C-alpha cells in the first residue's frame, strides 16, 4: 500500500509538471515544443535515475515516487529507455520491431481513434 501511495504522489507531481511545461510553451508557438521538451527531459530523467538506482541505490522507496512522476510526466521516456535496453542487449531485431510497431501501430491507432471519435 505504501508503494502505491508513493506512485500516486509521484504521478500527481508529474501530471502537474507536464501541465505546467506544456501550458508554458503552448502560448509561445504552434509547434508542439512543450511536448518535445517534456519527452526529452523525461528521457534524460529516467536514464539518469534508473542508472543511478541500479548502480547505487537499489531498494529505495523514493524510486516508486520517481516512477510515478516520470510515468505521469511522459511515457515516452519509458519507451526510449526500453529501446536503449534492447540496444544494450544487442537485440536489434526486437529493437527494430518495437520501434516500427510502436510508431506505426501507434499512429494508426491515433488516426483510428480520431476517426471513431468524430463519428460518435
Image (cartoon, rainbow, N blue to C red):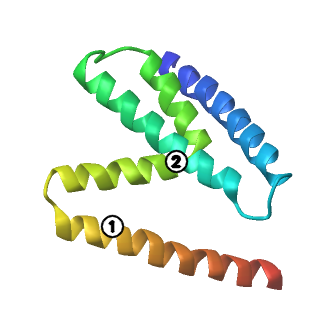
Which residue occupies the foreground of this view, 29 or 62? Answer: 29
Quadrant showing the C terminus: bottom right
Which residue occupies the foreground of this view, 27 or 95? Answer: 27
Picture quadrant of residue 46: top left
What crowding class fits label 2: few (fewer than 14 Cα within 10 Å), some (14-19), or many (20 or more)? some
Question: Farthest residue toward the front?
Answer: 28
Picture quadrant of residue 72: top right
* Residue located at (67% from left, 28% from top): 13
Real-space Cα separation, disc 1 to disc 2, in angstroms: 19 Å
Left or right position of 89 against 113: left
Question: Farthest residue toward the left?
Answer: 90
Counting from the top left corner in percent of width and height, residue 37 is at 61, 48
Counting from the top left corner in percent of width and height, residue 35 is at 65, 53
> Vertically, is 109 above or below 3?
below
Which residue occupies the foreground of this view, 6 or 52? Answer: 52
Counting from the top left corner in percent of width and height, residue 113 is at 67, 76
Left or right position of 38 against 23: left
User: Under tag 2, what secondary structure?
Assistant: helix
Counting from the top left corner in percent of width and height, residue 91 is at 16, 61
* Residue located at (81% from left, 53% from top): 26
What crowding class fits label 1: few (fewer than 14 Cα within 10 Å), some (14-19), or many (20 or more)? some
Q: Earlier in the sequence, mark 1 or mark 2?
A: 2
Left or right position of 89 against 78: left
Q: Which mark is residue 40?
A: 2
User: Under tag 1, what secondary structure?
Assistant: helix
* Residue located at (43% from left, 15% from top): 61
* Residue located at (32% from left, 23% from top): 53
Do the residues bearing badges 1 and 2 touch, measured as CB atoms within 8 Å?
Answer: no
Q: Which mark is residue 98?
A: 1
Amino acid at each position: 500500500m505504501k508503494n502505491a501511495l508513493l506512485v500516486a504522489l509521484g504521478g500527481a507531481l508529474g501530471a502537474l509538471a507536464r501541465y505546467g511545461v506544456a501550458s508554458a510553451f503552448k502560448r509561445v508557438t504552434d509547434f508542439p515544443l512543450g511536448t518535445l521538451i517534456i519527452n526529452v527531459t523525461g528521457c534524460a530523467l529516467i536514464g539518469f535515475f534508473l542508472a543511478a538506482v541500479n548502480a547505487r541505490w537499489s531498494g529505495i522507496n523514493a524510486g516508486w515516487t520517481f516512477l510515478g512522476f516520470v510515468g505521469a510526466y511522459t511515457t515516452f521516456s519509458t519507451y526510449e529507455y526500453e529501446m536503449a535496453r534492447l540496444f544494450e542487449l544487442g537485440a536489434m531485431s526486437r529493437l527494430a520491431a518495437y520501434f516500427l510497431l510502436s510508431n506505426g501501430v501507434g499512429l494508426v491507432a491515433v488516426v483510428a481513434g480520431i476517426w471513431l471519435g468524430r463519428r460518435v
